[in-house]
Image (spheres, helix red, strand yellow):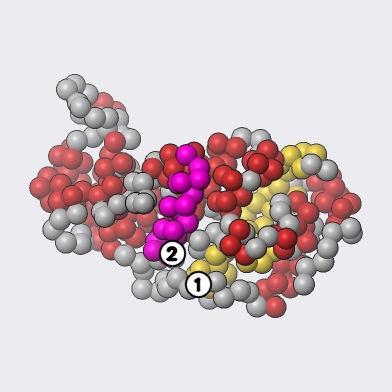
Amino acid sequence: MDIPGAQDNPLGSYLKDRRSKLDPLALGFSPARRRTPGLRREEVAQRANISATWYTWLEQGRGGAPSADVLDRIARALMLTDVEREHLFLLGLGRTPDVRYRKNEGVTPRLQRVLDALNPSPAFIRTATWDIVAWNTAATVILTDYGKLPPEQRNVLRFIFLDPRVRAAQYDWESVARFVVGAFRADAARAGAAAEVKPLVDEMCRLSPEFAAMWRDNDVHGHGEGIKHLRHPILGPVSFEYSAFAVDGRPDLGMVVYNPASPADAEKIRSVLGSAPKQE
């Protein structure tokens, strides 16, 4: 099964998708007599000050790799965000020289101690394919008891789209799900892990029509930081300030930390930490 929206020419698919989302009228082009939404190829080429033929070849997967200058012009023409621009460069020029995807090698005891020291803030380490490879006690209590699951099931996409309990815990599941898909896409491309995520994406598309539809949208997001609200089955509503961090020397790993948003939220978590199983 092909990945929806990412067949033999992912760069062309992404360019076509991005231009389809632009408003011709807002950019000074006539909206009349258009068979499809968005800008025409020649209009993108005009805005990027490049040949319309060359741009058409890019979308069709012809003519070889574009230069960084051409991609930069196209990014401006398509009004891409920083994350979308980075994704365009990864698709057009490949992984950056210092990024090499490595399959799961686990985490060091030192990194596990960092996670443990963050209690009562739930925290975990995930790979570029968003498999959870390490976590602390607070994550077990608030998010998921990862230790009870086989390693191949400890995946963020599986939790969000296939686990009814995780879905019910979200106040706005669709917004959360769209954010997760966009951030996952960006992380996998950044780590040069496109080949590694393909089997997972194929499976998720088969198991979840909602995932398949969101994947076809080709959106990308940076994880960054923000506020997350959860419905916990025991503690009730709990709010967090979340942040994502790169693990130094391991471009394939990222740490996500959910800091309780208030002293009351922190106290709720502490009240149940004592009865939770300790992390080995």
Please tell me the numbered disc located at residue 39: none
Q: Which residue occupies 57% across, 69% down? A: 247
The type of residue carrying mark 1 is: Lys
Q: Which image quadrant is residue 193 in? A: bottom left
Q: Residue 25: x, y in percent?
A: 26, 26
Q: Residue 161: x, y in percent?
A: 57, 44
- Determine the secondary structure under disc 2: helix
- Count residues near mark 2 (Cα–Cα under 10 Å), then give few for <14, some for 14-19, many for 20+: some
Residue closer to the observer: 161 or 278: 161
Q: Which residue occupies 39% across, 41% down? A: 217
Please tell me the numbered disc located at residue 196: 2
Q: Is residue 13 left or right of residue 229?
A: left
Magenta stretch: helix, strand or loop mostly: helix
Q: Residue 242: x, y in percent?
A: 65, 51
- Determine the secondary structure under disc 1: loop
Asked if the residues shown at circle 1 and circle 2 are in contact, with their CB atoms under 8 angstroms apart, the answer is yes
The type of residue carrying mark 2 is: Glu
Q: Is residue 278 left or right of residue 125?
A: right
Please tell me the numbered disc located at residue 103: 1
Q: Is residue 248 above or below residue 201?
A: below
Q: Magenta segment range?
A: 193-209
Q: Is residue 210 left or right of residue 45?
A: right
Residue 229 visible (yes or no): no
Q: Is residue 90 left or right of residue 111?
A: left
Q: Which residue occupies 38% across, 43% down? A: 216
Q: How many marks?
A: 2
Kindly give the residue lying farthest to the top in the view shown.
Answer: 32
Magenta residue check for 205: yes
